Amino acid sequence: MTYNFMRPRDMLKMSYTQTITIKDENMTIIIIHFLWIALSWLAASFQAYLDLDSLLKSLFAQTKQAL
């Protein structure tokens, strides 16, 4: 099995457009990663809100029954 790693001299041979394309691909990966983190955070926050809401409703129901 052979691996094709880019050597520094090959990187110097790359054209400007190839460099821009690689930077665009890296930025796309970074943006997707950031969006995934934001979506995960949003889902966790929403789940915490639902848990707190159900906890408060059950405590309110227990308090109401006690009175």
Image (cartoon, helix red, strand yellow):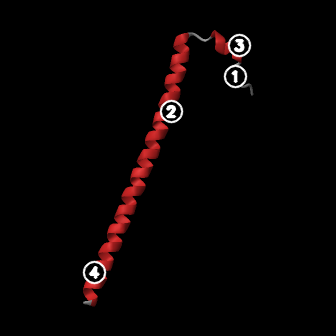
Q: Earlier in the sequence, mark 4 or mark 3?
A: 3
Separation (CA) of disc 1 from disc 2: 21 Å
In the rendering, which numbered label is found on residue 4? 1
The label nearer to you, 3 versus 1, is: 3
Q: Is residue 10 above or below residue 28?
A: above
How crowded pointer 3 is (Cα within 10 Å; few <14, some 14-19, many 20+) is rated as: few
Query: Tag 2: residue type?
Result: Ile
Query: Tag 3: residue type?
Result: Arg
Separation (CA) of disc 4 from disc 3: 72 Å
Residue on which disc 4 sits: 61
Residue on which disc 2 sits: 29
Q: Earlier in the sequence, mark 3 or mark 1?
A: 1
Residue on which disc 3 sits: 9
Q: Secondary structure at mark 4?
A: helix
How crowded pointer 2 is (Cα within 10 Å; few <14, some 14-19, many 20+) is rated as: few
Viewed as shown, does residue 41 lie left or right of 3? left
Q: Secondary structure at mark 1?
A: loop
Q: Earlier in the sequence, mark 3 or mark 2?
A: 3
Residue in the image at 47% along x and 30% along y: 28
Separation (CA) of disc 3 from disc 2: 26 Å
Query: Tag 4: residue type?
Result: Ala
Query: Tag 1: residue type?
Result: Asn
